[in-house]
Amino acid sequence: MNSNLMTRGLRKFQDMLGKSRQPKPLDERGLEKLRAQLQECADGLGGEVSARQRALRLGETYQRLDEAGKQAFLRLIATGFGPDPEKVAQAHAEYQQAIGTPAQWEAEARLWSALRSPRTRILTQFNALPQGVRFLVELRVDLLRFLQDDPELASLDRELEFALSSWFDVGFLELRRITWNSPAALLEKLIEYEAVHTIHSWTDLKNRLDSDRRCYGFFHPRMPDEPLIFVEVALTDQLAGDVQQLLDIDAPVFDTRAADTAIFYSISNTQDGLRGVSFGNFLLKRVIDDLQRDLPQLKQFATLSPLPTLRRWAEKHPEAWTQAFLPGDLERLSRLAAIPATVDAVKALLEQPDWAEIPRLSRALQAPLTRLAAQYLLTAKNQERLYDPVARFHLGNGARIERLNFLADTSAKGLSQSYGMMVNYLYEPDSIEENVEALLRQGRIAASSSVRHAARAGSK
C-alpha cells in the first residue's frame, strides 16, 4: 500500500469517526469476510504498513455497521479469538512440572504466551492509527452498552479495559490548565462534559474560568483535544459550604492575594469508554502541587462534594430515619407543617419541591438531615465498599470528611439526590497516607469530630 493511498485511507477513517453515516446490516457473507479480516489481524503478518492497512479496513467495516452488526462484530472477537484452551492446558501442565527447577522461568514464559489472547493483537493494531486509540475508546462505549444483555462480551471488555489502563497510564498524560483563552472547541467540550453542576451558558463558563478560579484537565497525546477528566477549583479564604454562591455569576471576583483555600467543587470524567481506568486521584495530587507552586499562600485544600446516593440509601434503610429524626424533631415538624409526628409524614414532606424555601421548616430539618447524612457517610456500605461513590473516591485518596453542609445545593438535582446536603472533604498533605492506610487496613474512615458527633447523636 503506497503512502498516498495510506494517507487517503487515514483521512477517510478520521472523517468516519467524526461523522454520522447510514448504518448497514451484517449478513452471513459479510460475517465470513469479517472473520477473515480478524484472522489476518490476529496472525499479525507483515510490517507496520500491513498492520495499518488491516486496522484501517477493520475500523471502516465496524464504523459502517448498524447496532446489530456492531454487536455481532464484537461477539465474534470475544468468542472466536480467545486463548487456545489446549495450548493453555499444556503450558500450565509444563509449568506445574517445572516449578522449583531451572526450567521454571521458561515454562512460565510459555504459559504467559499461551494465555495471551489473539484479541489483544487485534486491538493493539489500532495503535498504529492516529485516531486508533480514540476509536477503541468509542468502541468500548458500544461494548459496555451491549454487555448489559450479552454476558459473553465480558471477556473482551476485561481485555480492552486492561489494554486501555496500560495505554492511559498517568505517566503518559499531560496536566493542562484550561482558561477562557483556550480554544473554543475545548471550551465547548467543558460545557458538554460537565457532570456535576450543569454549565448553563457561556457567561456561566466564563465565571468558572475567571481569575479567582482554576480549571485543570488530563490529556492523552493520542487525544490531544479531548480532556479525559477535568476539575474546577475556586480560590477562597474559607471552607465553602454553599455551591450556589460558588456558581453565582453576579458575585464579585475574589482577590486571589487573600486566598488561603482551594475548593475543588466539580470533577468530571468525560470518556465513558474509559470506565474503570482510574486517574482522578493523580489529577488531584498534580493539581495540588501546581497550586502550591503558583500560590504558595494556600494552606487548605478541600472539596465541596455532592452526596449523589444519599436519598437512594435512605429510602432502603428505614432504621436510619428513626435514628436521625428524634421524637422532639418529629413533634416540632408536626407543629410547623401540620403533619402527623411520624417519619412517613416527614418523608412525604421532603417530596414537596418547596420545603427548602420555608425558613422555619428548613431550620427544623437541618439537625436531623445532618444526622442522616453523617450516618450515611460513616456507616453505609455495599459489599464492604463505601456506598457513596464520591466518598469512595476521596476517602480512598486520603481525604477526611470535614464538614456537612445543609442546603448547600438547592437545585432540583441536589434536593432529589441528597435533600440539598453537600460535604467538604479535606486534603491535608501530611495526613493523606495515614488516612489511606487506616481505611485499607482497619476500615476506619477519617472524619472530623463534628461529623462523628452528628452520627453518634443519631445512633443514641
Image (cartoon, rainbow, N blue to C red):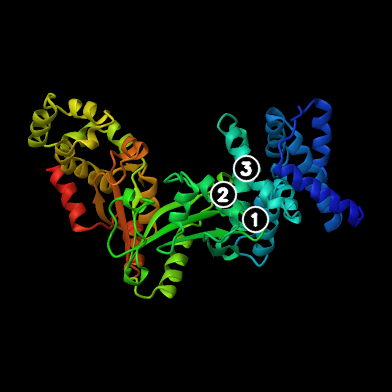
Q: Amino acid at mark 1?
A: Met
Q: Residues within 10 Å of mark 3 (few under 14, many from 20)?
A: many
Q: Amino acid at mark 2?
A: Glu
Q: Which residue is drawn at the image coordinates 72% and 41% (left, top)?
A: 81
Q: Which residue is drawn at the image coordinates 46% and 58% (left, top)?
A: 209
Among the two numbered marks 3 and 2 on one chain, the one whose residue lies closer to the N terminus: 3
Q: Amino acid at mark 3?
A: Arg
CA separation, marks 3 and 2? 23 Å
Q: Secondary structure at mark 3?
A: helix
Q: Looking at the image, do the residues carrying marks 3 and 1 touch, with CB atoms under 8 Å apart?
A: no
Horizontal side, residue 198 vs residue 371: left or right: right
Q: Is residue 154 above or below residue 341?
A: below
The residue tagged 3 is: 140
Q: Which residue is drawn at the image coordinates 73% and 37% (left, top)?
A: 80
Q: Residues within 10 Å of mark 2 (few under 14, many from 20)?
A: few
Residue 208 in sight: yes
* Picture coordinates of residue 352, whole percent (x, y): 26, 28
> Residue extending furthest right?
2
> In front: mark 3 or mark 2?
2
Count the numbered circles shown. 3
Horizontal side, residue 150 vs residue 411: left or right: right
Horizontal side, residue 129 vs residue 377: left or right: right
* Picture coordinates of residue 20, whole percent (x, y): 71, 36
The residue tagged 1 is: 223
> In front: mark 3 or mark 1?
1
- Numbered mark located on residue 188 in the image: 2
CA separation, marks 1 and 2? 16 Å
> In this orientation, which residue lies closer to the viewer: 240 or 440?
240
Q: Secondary structure at mark 1?
A: loop
> In this orientation, which residue lies closer to the viewer: 209 or 68?
209
